[in-house]
Image: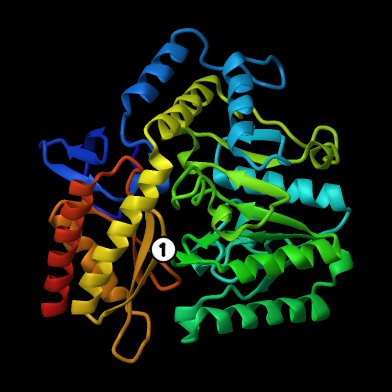
Amino acid sequence: MSHLSPVLKQATPVLASRGEGVYLYDEAGRRYLDFTAGIGVTSTGHCHPRVVRAAQEQVATLIHAQYTTVLHRPLLRLSERLGEVLPATLDSLFYVNSGSEAVEAAIRLARHATGRQNIVVFHGSFHGRTMGAAALTTAGPKFRAGIGPLMPGVAVAPFPQAYRYGWDEAEATRFALRELDYVLATICPPADTAAFVVEPMLGEGGYIPATPEFLAGLRERADRHDVLLVVDEVQTGFGRTGRFWGHEHFDVRPDVLITAKGLASGFPLSAIAAPTELMRRAWPGSQGGTYGGNAVACAAALATLEVIQDEGLVDNAAEMGQRLQNGLRKVAADHPMVGDVRGLGLMVGNEFSTPEGEPDPQRAQRAQQAACERGLLLLTCGAHGQVVRMIPPLVVNVDQIDEALALWADAVATVDLG
């Protein structure tokens, strides 16, 4: 009898039978507040009626139309609608299925367009598990260990992780930009560098926002050296941070934007966006794929955009995110083992530290499990697994935020007593 790979490790013991809004239900009918959202995927909540209806209607008419063979209307409509929310210069789209695939496509485009090999990424990054994307990923060894040699031509520079360094944001930013210049001066000459690839906020790396000065510094250096600035919005996009795109917090202009996760409320769909002139520089035949731009996924993405707009979910993410952070900081004030609370919108991390200031993954894991026992589903992240992250669907309301805060406070208190 076949079974799942033993290497797959579930973060919770829940066997989900159905979902509705911010809730999941197991087979016994127990309800859980889902503050994982499928790792930031179910942006409009589980089974939003409008997304369900759009997918059902599309399934009944056309499921798969391979988009380098024939076109279909949901794909064309989605491209038009994305043009309304993307930066104006990013007017050309290429669709695939997963975040990793979109990252791979962005790497390929950057190398083709510039004729250069090197890619600079930033410490704590997560860009995927496929071979090229794994080479760009530095959030932890499990994503890249044992599969080398990895794709060459990747250099790593610091990200302004103020809490990790024990500095304020200004000092961490100065350090990160100074070290980037040193990387360019010593091991990754600008004339060989195709792109800087950066997350506006580290995801797997610990839910650490960038700073305006850091991203402005990347933009300035990219312009000075004719390097492309590729912004990975796989997790930060589609309203997650309280702006439609995470980079909007920092007033920075990307040359290439990568999106996935919340794009289609749970259906597999991802894309890269770039100026048409830049996209034309990809070599013929370098873009394609059997399932990219699937008709049902595109229909779900269209419905997702409509729901986000009609229900004011970007503003809701900002408002509910602030309420969540305020409540989490009150919990942290009573429990010093939670050394830092940080985030943007509904993308919030709680970092656990020892009294000596070292990462404390054991307590983070115990708090995550204690929360699950109380009906609150959470995940960990960070290099050591020391950060408990909260990423509820964008439809979350005041009562649900407050319920989650009460469950979290009880879970953390239990761990503290233990």
Helix, strand or loop under label 1: strand
Image coordinates for residue 236, horizontal then vertical, percent: 50, 51
The residue sitting at 69% across, 53% down in the picture is 253
Residue 172 appears in the picture as rendered: yes
Is residue 163 shown left or right of residue 415?
right
Total marks drawn? 1
Image coordinates for residue 179, horizontal then vertical, percent: 69, 81
How many C-alpha atoms fall within 10 Å of the one at disc 1: few (<14), some, or many (≥20)? many
The residue sitting at 86% across, 41% down in the picture is 281
Q: Is residue 86 above or below residue 323?
A: above
Is residue 243 shown left or right of residue 285?
left
Image coordinates for residue 123, horizontal then vertical, percent: 58, 71
Give residue 323's quadrant in the image: bottom left
Residue toward you, 89 or 341: 89
Q: Is residue 326 above or below residue 384?
A: above
Residue toward you, 199 or 130: 199
What residue is pinned by disc 1? 343
**Residue located farthest toward the bottom when viewing the structure as drawn:** 356
Q: Is residue 52 above or below residue 145?
A: above
Q: How is the image coloured?
A: rainbow
The residue sitting at 22% across, 48% down in the picture is 398
Quarter of the image where the N terminus is located: top left
The residue sitting at 66% across, 74% down in the picture is 157
Q: Is residue 11 above or below residue 33?
A: below
Type of amino acid under label 1? Gly
Quarter of the image where the C terminus is located: bottom left
Residue 13 appears in the picture as rendered: no
Residue toward you, 65 or 110: 110
Image coordinates for residue 52, horizontal then vertical, percent: 36, 22
